[in-house]
Image (cartoon, rainbow, N blue to C red):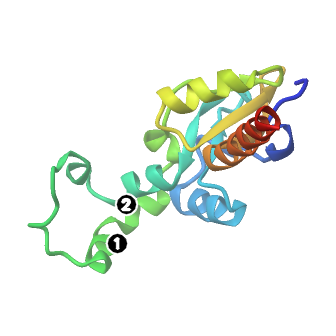
Amino acid sequence: MPDSIVSAVLREVEPLSADELVGVAARKVVESSLPGLPAVEDDGTFAGIFGEREFMAALFPGYVGELGSSAMIRRSIDETIDRRESCREEPIRKYLTTDHVVVEDEYSDTQLAELFLHHRVLIIPIASDGRIHAVVTRGDFFQALVARFSDIAEDVGS
């Protein structure tokens, strides 16, 4: 990764198991301070991403995602949690975002930009020989890109 803008913002992670339970996986995501974590199959292959959006999909009934507006639903969040509390014991497998966005260590910054632009993901898993070991967040990528952009703009203006 010569001169990669994101080499300094790679975050090493321990992937979730695709069979991890929603309640446990959600806590791990919060503890990671990341918007999501990659999930892998038993053989270590990429299964998908579980994070903020996927947790909300598990917690809220499916029709909420289809609504143009939920203004007519007057149920409190506590009522929703009570009704869907059982999702805590469901495997995350059924809620994963499964877009294939994993890149190997020799990725290019442009490749990451393309993935962030074309997929609805907040993280891109980074693999070495097919084993996920790190992620790049969209926010970190954005900050690194703006810094590089600013540095180049200053050099050109000098």
Quadrant housing residue 150: top right
> Whole-percent x and y of residue 53?
45, 51
Residue at the image position 46 percent from the left and 37 percent from the top: 120
Quadrant housing residue 134: top right
Residue at the image position 61 percent from the left and 43 percent from the top: 138
- Whether residues under marks 1 and 2 lie with C-beta atoms below 8 angstroms apart, the answer is yes
> Whole-percent x and y of residue 111?
66, 21
Residue at the image position 66 percent from the left and 60 percent from the top: 28
Against 58, residue 82 (above or below) is below
Q: Nearer the viewer, residue 72 or 50?
A: 72
Task: Please identify the quadrant where the C terminus is shown.
Answer: top right
- Under circle 1, the secondary element is helix
Mark 1–mark 2 Cα distance, whole angstroms, equals 7 Å
> Whole-percent x and y of residue 88?
47, 62
Q: Nearer the viewer, residue 87 or 35?
A: 35
Using residue 108 as the reference point, say whether residue 63 is left or right of it. left
Against 69, residue 1 (above or below) is above
Amino acid, disc 2: Leu
Q: Nearer the viewer, residue 82 or 102?
A: 102
The circle drawn on residue 81 is 1
- Under circle 2, the secondary element is helix
Q: Which residue is mark 2?
A: 59
Using residue 144 as the reference point, say whether residue 30 is left or right of it. left
Using residue 55 as the reference point, say whether residue 146 is left or right of it. right
